[in-house]
Image: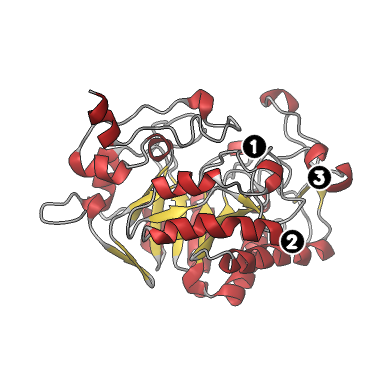
Amino acid sequence: MTGEGSIPLLTPYQMGKFKLSHRIVLAPLTRVRSYGNVPQPHAILYYSQRTTKGGLLIAEATGVSETAQGYPHTPGIWTKEQVEAWKPIVDAVHAKGGIFFCQIWHVGRVSNSGFQPNEQAPISSTDKALTPQNYPTQFTPPRRLRTEEIPQIVNDFKVAARNAIEAGFDGVEIHGAHGYLIDQFMKDQVNDRTDQYGGSLENRCRFALEIVEAVVNEIGADRVGIRLSPFADYMESGDSNPEALGLYMVESLNKYNIVYCHMVEPRMKTLEGKTECSQSLVPMRKAFKGTFISAGGYDREDGIKAVAENRTDLVCYGRLFLANPDLPRRFELNKPLNKYIRETFYLPDPVVGYTDYPFLEEEEDDK
């Protein structure tokens, strides 16, 4: 794919021990097609369609425990059945030469009792509920985790990471973004704790860094990435000083030598689209010693520019990659892109809006 005159996005890159042939990454995208929280055979085709030799894929957010769920049909990796179900999906990506990381998450308070064991309250850093009228779903007011319960949640992430490696994944991405559990601890708009996990920036980041340490000790730093969104306020998880939060986190992460930090652009204030913004990821990019991955509303030109200007190493694409399984090839040839169909993003259908987007050759055959 790469060669003379390649665009910056299509140049090779060494990410720790992984030799990438290009810098276009499949973003972790919730697809709600894992019935009963078990990955399904139709995911084999979905992920293999989007695999290129030497390309990095990040799997959709995958629950670390039975309390981690907040959406229907999202996959987990806490049971033997789930681990076994992931194996053929991972094998299909590896058969095409891809590198595959599993994003491990816990939704925290972004849930309701219907998703929880014994219909209990979701757990969080706080007992503050999300504002009911702001969302189409009803969220149950959460229960604040007691200090002595936190090591168990850290352990859930550690076990999930071990399970991901058993399933064949090359590594894990810890989901510390978008208002989910780890973000609920980090952000001062949510975290109102008075123990060692609340108050100061150091205390609020303690939970995230304990998870990083546990996962690194379990599977090795060269297999661990993290996703952060210090500037975003998804799910009412904003922070009064996002730049200080981002810098503190990347400087702390350097001590663990993890392979990458994946950050969401400040312009992505909402899930719907870009806003103009004077803030930048550049200070965090400069401070972080490993591979830096940027996400958030990138198109081809944006991505080329970000890599050319050394503002990032790799660029994550979500909606465009969802709608264009051969996105790296389309970018290489500068071909038109399929338009994504938002209405089918979260259909539980095993084909529609999932594996039915055409490849370039199919489109040309149809003409």
Q: Secondary structure at mark 1?
A: helix
Q: Residues within 10 Å of mark 2 (few under 14, many from 20)?
A: some
Location of mark 1 (residue)? 236
- Label 2 residue SS: helix
Q: Which is more N-terminal, label 1 or label 3?
A: 3
Which is more foreground, mark 2 or mark 1?
Answer: 2
First in sequence: mark 2 vs mark 1: 2
Name the amino acid type tagged 3: Gln
**Dot label at residue 153:** 2
Residue 193, image x, y percentages = 77, 53
User: Is 201 rendered above or below residue 365?
Assistant: below
Mark 3 or mark 2, whichever is nearer to me: 3
Q: Amino acid at mark 2?
A: Ile
* Residue at horizontal 34 percent and vertical 54 percent from the top: 314
Asked which quadrant contains residue 163, the reply is bottom right
Q: Position of residue 262 (x, y in %)?
A: 46, 54
Q: Amino acid at mark 1?
A: Glu
Can residue 356 be seen here? Answer: yes
Q: Residue most toward the left?
A: 4
Distance between mark 3 and mark 2 Cα atoms: 15 Å
In the picture, the disc for residue 26 is: none
Query: From the viewer's perspective, is residue 137 above or below residue 303?
Result: above
Left or right: residue 40 versus residue 113 is: left
Disc 3 designates what residue?
Answer: 116
The mark that comes first in sequence, 3 or 2, is: 3
Q: CA distance from mark 3 to mark 1?
A: 21 Å
Residue plotted at (36% across, 61% down): 97
Mark pair 2, 1: CA separation: 22 Å
Quarter that holds the C terminus? top left
Disc 3 element: loop
Q: Nearer the viewer, residue 33 or 309?
A: 33
